[in-house]
Amino acid sequence: MTDTPGTRSGTAQPPAGGGFAVVEMFTSQGCNSCPPAEELLSEIDRDARERGQPVYALGFHVDYWDHLGWVDPYGDAAHTLRQEAYARAFRSGGLYTPQMIVNGTVEFVGSDRRQASSAIASALTEEAATPLGLSVEDVAEGTDGRRRVVVNYQAERLPERAVLNVAVVERGLENDVPRGENAGRRLRQDGVVRAFTSGKLDFGRGRVELEMPPQLDPRHASVVGYVQKDEDKTIVGAAAVDVSAR
């Protein structure tokens, strides 16, 4: 993460200290148990946006189902590595999909509506230990046709060994699945992680740059940032801003 102490103070949103819920789901289009969880994640995302609640839905598509005949177009080995890091922290001994994790501490089967509702409601009652503000400074297209988004962040009360995760998520994605366990289905997904970076956070203010896929529609995309303790994966602060909010 780049330290930019001279960044204009007006570019970042003022950090807010209320409760929040970061909802990470590990999923795959190759898993026939995942579509109900995808629908639940879409509901969580839609309800939060309609109500103006600080609930941030992120769908991390893993790659370990790809061998069954359908390569998930949103799958990434880095997402699998992130899930493996959680498995080590939880000492669970294995990976599964769909898995939902709220604020880095509570995990359960991603289609479990009751547990999701309970975990999110509980998270919203706890004040953020590390208030975080985000703003989009620039969205530019390079000579290679790929868009890059530059995000400013401002954080307070950083814990030791803090990590800042920044994701670009896209809503309203649909595609047909011709092979694998979901063969013949048309899937619709929201909160799909399309770009992600994570790095050590030593300073309370800085700038992050992410490269976005050329097919991404910035009108349906947001940047989600969240501060996480490296040792136990607890998420202590989060914020989001639409990519088009400049």
Image (cartoon, rainbow, N blue to C red):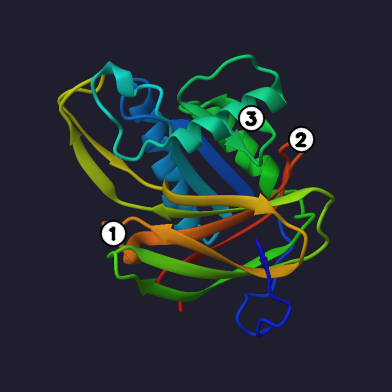
> Could you give the CA–CA distance between mark 3 and mark 2, rounded to whole angstroms?
9 Å
Instruction: Give the crowd class for mark 1: few <14, some 14-19, many >=20 residues within 10 Å.
Output: few
Determine whether the residue tagged by mark 1 lies in a helix, strand or loop: loop
* Residue positioned 50% across, 50% down in the render: 196
Q: Which residue is nearer to you in this view: 217 or 148?
A: 148
Q: Position of residue 79 (x, y in %)?
A: 49, 36
Placement of 23 over or under 153, stated as above or below: above
Query: Residue at label 1?
Result: 214
Placement of 244 over or under 188, stated as above or below: below
> Could you give the CA–CA distance between mark 1 and mark 2, rounded to whole angstroms?
35 Å
Q: Position of residue 211 (x, y in %)?
A: 42, 59
> Could you give the CA–CA distance between mark 1 and mark 3, rounded to whole angstroms?
30 Å
Farthest residue in the top direction?
Answer: 93
- Mark 1 or 2 closer to N-term? 1
**What residue type is disc 3 on?**
Tyr
Instruction: Give the crowd class for mark 3: few <14, some 14-19, many >=20 residues within 10 Å.
Output: many
Q: Position of residue 231 (x, y in %)?
A: 78, 37
